[in-house]
Amino acid sequence: AQSVTQLGSHVSVSEGALVLLRCNYSSSVPPYLFWYVQYPNQGLQLLLKYTTGATLVKGINGFEAEFKKSETSFHLTKPSAHMSDAAEYFCAVSERDDKIIFGKGTRLHILP
Amino acid sequence: GAVVSQHPSWVICKSGTSVKIECRSLDFQATTMFWYRQFPKQSLMLMATSNEGSKATYEQGVEKDKFLINHASLTLSTLTVTSAHPEDSSFYICSGETGASYEQYFGPGTRLTVT
C-alpha cells in the first residue's frame, strides 16, 4: 500500500528565501504524485502533479517539484518565498487508481 | 475549469439531528466522488468513494449507517451525517474525478459543528 511522509510539520522561511518542503513516498507501482495547498477553512488547490514524463514538474505560483525515483522523493521548492505562500501544504500519492493518500501536511510560515 | 462546490459551507446542528452536505461538480461530470474528513491541524482522511448510481465504498472504520452517501447523478453527491454527535464535528471535503484522469478536484469544504 502507498504512503506519504512529510518531514516537518512546520517550516519557517524568511520572505524572499528558498522554500523547500520535503516529501517521501512508498508505492508498489510507479506512482502519481501531487502537491496541494490549503488555506485556512478552504479546500485543497492542486499546485502540481507528476504522472509520467519529465521528472521536474512546474506548478502554479512559482512552485516546482522533482520526482526522484531512486530517493522515493517528491520535494516541493520555490526560489523566493512570498508572504502569500503561508499555508498548509499536502503531498499525496496515488497508485494510479482512484485513491489518493495524503501526507500529514506541512504548515509553511513566512517570516517578514 | 473543474470546479466543485459544497453546500453549506458551514453548519451548526444539535446533537441527535441529521445534516446533509451537498457536493456538486459545476463544469464537469464526476464519475467518481470522494468524501474526506479533516480534523483540526490534521490531514485529510478518505471516508468513502462513490460512483454514480452505485453504492458507496466506505473505508475501514467509517460507519456506513452513520455517514450516508448518495451519488444520484454525475454532478451531485450528498453526505448525510445521521444522529450527529459532537465528535462528528469536523471539516468535510468532497472531490470529484472525471474518469479521464486520476486527478481529483476538491470542493471548498463544509465545517460541521455539533453542539
Image (spheres, rainbow, N blue to C red):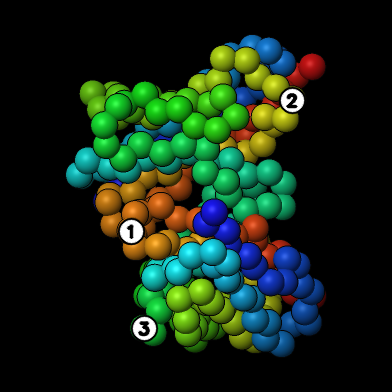
* Residue located 62% across and 75% down the image: B22
- Judge from the rendering whether residue B55 lies leftward or rightward of residue A18; answer left or right: left
Query: What is the total number of numbered labels drawn onto the structure image?
Result: 3
Distance of label 2 from label 1 (alpha carbons): 36 Å
Q: Amino acid at mark 3?
A: Ser
Along the polypeptide, which appears first: circle 1 or circle 3?
A: 3
Q: Is B99 located above or below residue B63 in the figure?
A: above
Image coordinates for residue A86, horizontal then vertical, percent? 69, 31
* Residue located 37% across and 44% down the image: A93
Distance of label 3 from label 2 (alpha carbons): 45 Å
Which circle marks residue A50 in the picture? Answer: none
Distance of label 1 from label 3 (alpha carbons): 19 Å
Image coordinates for residue B86, horizontal then vertical, percent? 71, 73
Q: Which residue is mark 3?
A: B54
Query: Where, quadrant-wise, is the C terminus of chain A in this rendering?
Result: top right
Determine the image quadrant of residue A75: top left
Q: Chain of mark 2?
A: A
Q: Regarding mark 3 in the picture, which secondary structure is present there?
A: loop
Tell me whether marks 2 and 1 sit on the same chain. no
Q: Chain of mark 3?
A: B
Q: Is residue B55 visible?
A: no
Which circle marks residue A83 in the picture? Answer: 2
- Which is closer to the viewer, label 1 or label 3? 1
